[in-house]
Amino acid sequence: AQRSAARLVELVESAGRRLTTGFIGSAFLLDALERAGAERLALELLMRDEFPSLGYMVRRGATSIWERWDGLMPGAGPACASMNSFNHYALSSMFSWAITGLCGLRPSEREPAFRRFGFAPVASRRLSEAHFGFDAPVGRIEVGWSWSGDDELAGELVVPVGATARVASEIAVDERRATAVSPGALRDVDDEPTWPANRKWWSVGPGRQVVHWRLTSKL
C-alpha cells in the first residue's frame, strides 16, 4: 500500500501537478492522495485554476462542471462538438473531496445515514474559511472552519439529535499540522477505514459544537 501511495504521488508530480484523470479516476484521486499523506497536493489540485482544472472552468465562465477538461480550450472554443456536456457528473465527482476533505465531513461506514460522522478538515492559508451543511436523514448537519488568529483555527459543527460526531485531535494545514486545544477524552477509532489514519478522536453529542486547533509541527 505504501509503494502504491508513493507511486500515485510520483505520477501526479511527474505530470507537473496537472490533472490527467478522467471519468473514473477523478472521483477517487484527491481522497487517495490524502490517504497517501499528500493532503497539500490534493488541496492544490482542487484549488488550481490553470488548464485543466475545475478552477479553469470557473475562469471560463462555467456555472456547472463540464463533461470534459477540454470542454473549452484555452483561448479557443470547444475541443469537439459532440460528447461535450457543460453540466455533467463525471468530473464534478472530484468535488466531493471539498466536502469530505476541505470541509472535513467524514461519513461513517459503520453507522450509515450520518448517525455517526467524523470532523477532520484539511485547512489552508489560501482560504479564510470553508463551510458545508445539508439535511441528512437524521437531521441538519453543518461543518466548517475559519482562521481565528495567526496560528489558530476555529472549527464548528452542528450535530443533530440522534447522531454523534467524532472530532479529530489533529488536522493537516498546508505543510503543517494543527493540534486541538483542550480536547475532550481522546480515543482511537480503528473501525473507520475511510477516515484519516493515525489520529485520535473525541466524541461530541447533539448541538452546536466548537473546537480550536493550533498550528504545531511540520508535516
Image: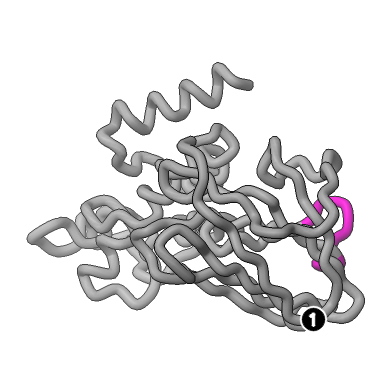
Q: Main secondary structure of the magenta part?
A: loop
* The image quarter in which residue 182 lies: bottom right
Q: Secondary structure at mark 1?
A: strand
Quadrant of the rendered image containing residue 193? top right
For this orientation, the residue located farthest to the top is 3
| Dot 1 amino acid type | Gly
Question: In the picture shown, does residue 106 fall above or below 191?
Answer: below
What range of the chain is rendered magenta? Answer: 108-115
Of residues 216 and 138, the one nearer the viewer is 216
Q: Quadrant of the N terminus?
A: top right
Q: Nearer the viewer, residue 157 or 134?
A: 157
Front residue of 38/81: it is: 38
Which residue is farthest front?
182
110 within the magenta span: yes
Q: Is residue 25 visible?
A: no
Relative to 2, 210 lies left or right: right
